[in-house]
Amino acid sequence: MLLKTIFLSKYSPKKYQNFYLFFAISTLMPLCLVAVINLVIDPYLYFYSPTFKKVNQLKPEREKHLMLSKAAEINYIEAKIIFLGSSRVMSGLNTEYPGLKYPNSTYNLGLPGANMYQVMHYFNHALANQSQIKQVILGIDFFMFNEYLKNLENFDETRLGKKIVVKDIINSLLSIDALQASITTFNANLSNQNKSNSKEPKTSRFKRWLTNFLSYEGFYGKYNLSQARLENLQAIIDKCKQNNIDIKVFISPTHATQYEAMNIAGLSSTFEQWKREVVKITPVWDFSGYNSITTELINDRMENYIDNSHYSPKVGDLVLNRILSFQTERVPKDFGILLTQDNIETHLHQIRLDREVWRKEHPEEVNLVRKIKAKLDN
């Protein structure tokens, strides 16, 4: 008993209370400071924190974490209209377009480099968290149905279908990566420079993007039309029908050189077969091919294109004009046709004829694609 009393008096926890308190404070204070900084700056737009000029208004780091930020953003916005698709939709369609029924309740869920599997899952995520969705506008692209286009590395299905994801909250609040992103964001706002805005000349961008599409196996370097990706599209259509959601599907209006790249990669017949398979699932507005928009001459002052893959918001407005029957008098007559199983073959035949005309009239652009492919093959 005496030994126990001596031991407890010598090693009593009370003697260490100040040490424990100091240790806890010295450990928690830096973490709390990091959390406050990341919450206020909100570099990934994960928490939808208030924005302040010269502090966190610009979000240059967000583009690197779109899978994270968009999964969170859809929980904050009461969306009645959803734009779905790839980066072409993200950069080309304007959520404030005046012809929308709910312009103040429209969210752009475009995902750069996404395949149809990812698009389907993000749509399901939106549907799980937004009960008021009335319309979906889905832009589809040939590469999204490529069997070899794998899921993006930062795609995480475990964060989808939920409003709160503890792992994402912790990573966005307490990680060193998030802190570094906050510092970068704050510096960008101080200098008013958003590094995500590229000043690369458009002629250079065309060469770079054509090279990417012809070399990367997820695009045209290696292609196999995936039945599973077609089923992903079917699943989206079915979900919309089940939930009384109006859905409009369109094929993006990429530049004519994009189709020449498909042709030189030996994918023209596969591209046509893809369209045949799509119209078996749903009618689709086709803005691809050779028309007054897609055949704009390549130069650094182009109005219709950012590069051969991405159309400008000006063209995006024309796409929406056509499919929503709004101010159609502003849309070129040759821009956009609703494809069904009844007119698909006639349409494909016309595109083949248009291609031959375009190739004869634009030898320099044809040669541009050929030179890029020849360089890749050497």
Image (cartoon, rainbow, N blue to C red):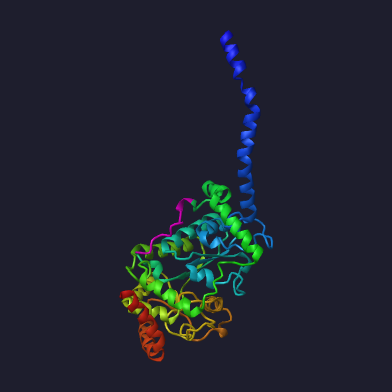
Q: Which x, y percent locates residue 35?
A: 61, 48
Q: Which x, y percent locates residue 243?
A: 50, 60
- Give, as a single range, the part of the protein colored magenta: 148-158
Pick whichever, 278 or 30, lies toward us: 30
Q: In the picture shown, does residue 354 fall above or below 149? A: below
Pick whichever, 99 or 263, lies toward us: 263
Q: In the picture shown, does residue 143 fall above or below 18? A: below
Q: Is residue 7 left or right of residue 365?
A: right
Instruction: Quadrant for residue 6, please give it.
Output: top right
Q: Is residue 157 left or right of residue 34?
A: left
| Main SS class of the magenta portion in the image | loop
Q: Is residue 286 visible?
A: no
Q: Residue at x 65, y 65 (%)?
A: 191
Instruction: Quadrant for residue 343, please give it.
Output: bottom left
Quadrant (top left/top right/bottom left/bottom right) for the C terminus: bottom left
In reply to whether residue 153 is colored magenta, the answer given is yes
Q: Is residue 100 visible?
A: yes
